[in-house]
Image (cartoon, rainbow, N blue to C red):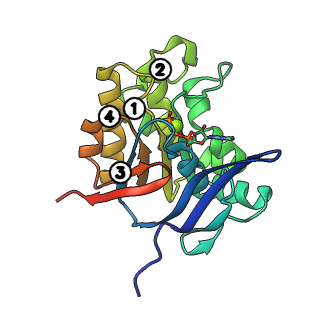
Amino acid sequence: MTPPAVIELRGVGKTYYSGEIATPVLFDISFPVRRGEFIAIVGGSGSGKTTLLNLMGLLDRPTTGEVLIEGEQAGHLDELGRAKVRRERLGFIFQFHYLLPEFTVIENALMPCRMKGADYHDQQEPRMRKLLETVGLGEKLRSRPAQLSGGQQQRVAVVRSLANDPALVLADEPTGNLDSRSGRVVFDLMRTLSRESGTTFVMVTHDDDFALEADRVIRIRDGRIEKSAERG
Ligand SMILES: Nc1ncnc2c1ncn2[C@@H]1O[C@H](COP(=O)(O)OP(=O)(O)OP(=O)(O)O)[C@@H](O)[C@H]1O
Ligand SMILES: [Mg+2]
């Protein structure tokens, strides 16, 4: 039996409502993501990329259709149910790193483990320390985010996204705030982690060079999939 897709969207649509005003943003989006895939989502500003990623990450609920995580219907769970799936199976990287300023690098990286309990936190500490060393931050474990460069901060955010050993990492323009050199370092890091640990990544990006290095590129236009292309 083939294992279920890490995540699958079936006929997903999203309309935002504000009072009487309805703003339809996504229409009938369907695709599965296989384990270990690295997917880039591209498209113009306002095309619906962040909305799509938020639905995949269970940060918001679809208006129509269903989001399945590892074969289980999850898109319409209530806030508590979705938070549980997020905490246990998903990792997030945003354009801004959202590191907590009063905590050190290693504490920030371990923050999602803390939410899973003290035992899990202590158990994961060596793995997270090693990952931070791998990404070149071994000397910075006890530094605070403000003492790091933008690229270093974002590397911590990438490591943090792996804290709960997620089935899927969702990244919304993770290199969007960085200069091209730091952006390249952060992207290569994600790409290497996906190859070495088999972690599945879905990344929104404006950078065509990065998109070309993904296993598959999904192009969104006016809330619909315009094109989905595998790398040949
Ligand atoms: N909460 C909301 N209420 C109403 N409309 C919204 C809301 N959030 C987003 N939109 C609208 O939905 C559309 C898609 O927005 P979205 O943020 O998904 O675009 P995007 O592709 O991520 O754009 P960008 O590349 O600029 O980040 C836009 O027209 C936006 O104005
Ligand atoms: Mg966006």
- Per the rendering, the mark at residue 194 is 3
Could you give the CA–CA distance between mark 4 and mark 3, rounded to whole angstroms?
A: 19 Å
Task: Say whether residue 33 is visible.
Answer: yes
Q: Nearer the viewer, residue 153 or 221?
A: 221
Q: Kindly indicate whether the residue at mark 2 contacts the one at mark 4 (C-beta within 8 angstroms).
A: no
Numbered disc in front, either 1 or 4: 4
Numbered disc in front, either 1 or 3: 3
Residue 152: x, y in percent? 43, 22
Q: Kindly indicate whether the residue at mark 4 contacts the one at mark 1 (C-beta within 8 angstroms).
A: no
- Identify the residue shown where x is 42% and y is 49%: 221
Between discs 2 and 1, the one toward the N terminus: 1
Instruction: Report which residue position mark 2 lands on.
Output: 140
Could you give the CA–CA distance between mark 1 and mark 3, rounded to whole angstroms?
A: 17 Å
Residue 174: x, y in percent? 45, 34
Task: Say whether residue 198 is visible.
Answer: no
Identify residue type, mark 3: Ser
Between discs 4 and 2, the one toward the N terminus: 2
Could you give the CA–CA distance between mark 2 and mark 1, rounded to whole angstroms?
A: 9 Å
Identify residue type, mark 1: Glu
Q: Secondary structure at mark 3?
A: helix
Between discs 3 and 2, the one toward the N terminus: 2
Pointer 3: residues within 10 angstroms few (<14), some, or many (20+)?
some
Could you give the CA–CA distance between mark 1 and mark 4, rounded to whole angstroms?
A: 27 Å
| Rendering quadrant holding ligand 1 | top right
Quadrant position of residue 143: top right
Identify residue type, mark 2: Lys
Ligand 1 closer than 8 Å to the CB at disc 4? Answer: no
- Per the rendering, the mark at residue 46 is none
Between discs 1 and 3, the one toward the N terminus: 1
Q: Kindly indicate whether the residue at mark 3 contacts the one at mark 1 (C-beta within 8 angstroms).
A: no
Left or right of 231 on screen, residue 5 = right
